[in-house]
């Protein structure tokens, strides 16, 4: 499982011309799921998201977590995070999980995250054509892979 986290002042996802999810200060999480991913990957990533200290404290140092700033999270599924460009110029998405595997893991990720942060997590719609808008705060962008754990 792979995520890209962006610290945002605000973010939204629009589907078919209508805003489907929107947050203020917090994190935009792009989520890519592989066929081999399991609940352990979800638990580890959700723990990272909940505890990651990437918000500024009073001394303007990145020292505060999502809960410290009462931030929100918007989750967007993004199979292209597992793109391979090793061969040729057209990316391969062979490592991305097919919908019958990815959708239950996507839903489990959202439910686990909601429990961890104690808030409803707005999302996009899995597999939909989405327009994501954000104001990246900092900018701060971090990628995390549950298989590498670095």
Image: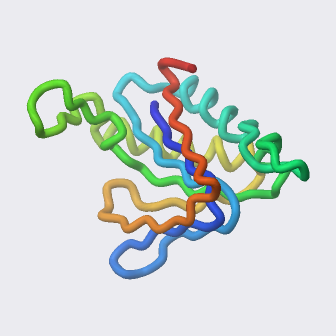
Report how many numbered discs are placed on residues in the image.
Answer: 0
Which residue: 48% across, 72% down?
20
Looking at the image, the residue that sits furthest to the left is 88
Residue 28 percent coordinates (x, y): 56, 54
The reply, left or right, for residue 2 in relation to residue 91 is right
The reply, left or right, for residue 24 in relation to residue 31 is right
Residue 109 percent coordinates (x, y): 55, 41
Residue 130 percent coordinates (x, y): 36, 65
Which residue: 66% across, 40% down?
49
The reply, left or right, for residue 49 in relation to residue 69 is left
Question: Colour scheme in the image?
Answer: rainbow
Position of residue 103 relative to residue 17, above or below, is: above
Which residue: 63% across, 30% down?
43
Looking at the image, the residue that sits furthest to the right is 58
Quadrant of res 41: top right
Quadrant of res 34: top left
Residue toward you, 142 or 94: 142
Residue toward you, 110 or 59: 59
Q: Where, quadrant-wise, is the C terminus in this rendering?
A: top right
Residue toward you, 145 or 119: 145
Residue 105 percent coordinates (x, y): 47, 38
Position of residue 134 relative to residue 114, above or below, is: below
Which residue: 41% across, 60% down?
125
Residue toward you, 129 or 91: 91
Looking at the image, the residue that sits furthest to the bottom is 17
Looking at the image, the residue that sits furthest to the front is 59
């Amino acid at each position: 499982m792979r995520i890209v986290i962006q610290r945002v002042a605000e973010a939204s996802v629009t589907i078919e011309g209508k805003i489907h999810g929107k947050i203020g200060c917090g994190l935009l999480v792009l989520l890519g799921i592989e066929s081999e991913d399991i609940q352990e990957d979800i638990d580890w990533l959700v723990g990272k998201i909940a505890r990651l200290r990437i918000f500024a404290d009073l001394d303007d140092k990145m020292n505060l977590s999502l809960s410290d700033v009462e931030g929100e999270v918007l989750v967007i599924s993004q199979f292209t995070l597992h793109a391979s460009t090793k061969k040729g110029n057209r990316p391969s998405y062979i490592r991305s999980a097919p919908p019958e595997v990815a959708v239950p893991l996507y839903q489990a990720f959202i439910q686990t995250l909601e429990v961890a942060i104690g808030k409803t997590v707005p999302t996009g719609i899995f597999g939909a054509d989405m327009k994501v808008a954000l104001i990246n705060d900092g900018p701060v962008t971090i990628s995390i892979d549950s298989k590498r754990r670095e």
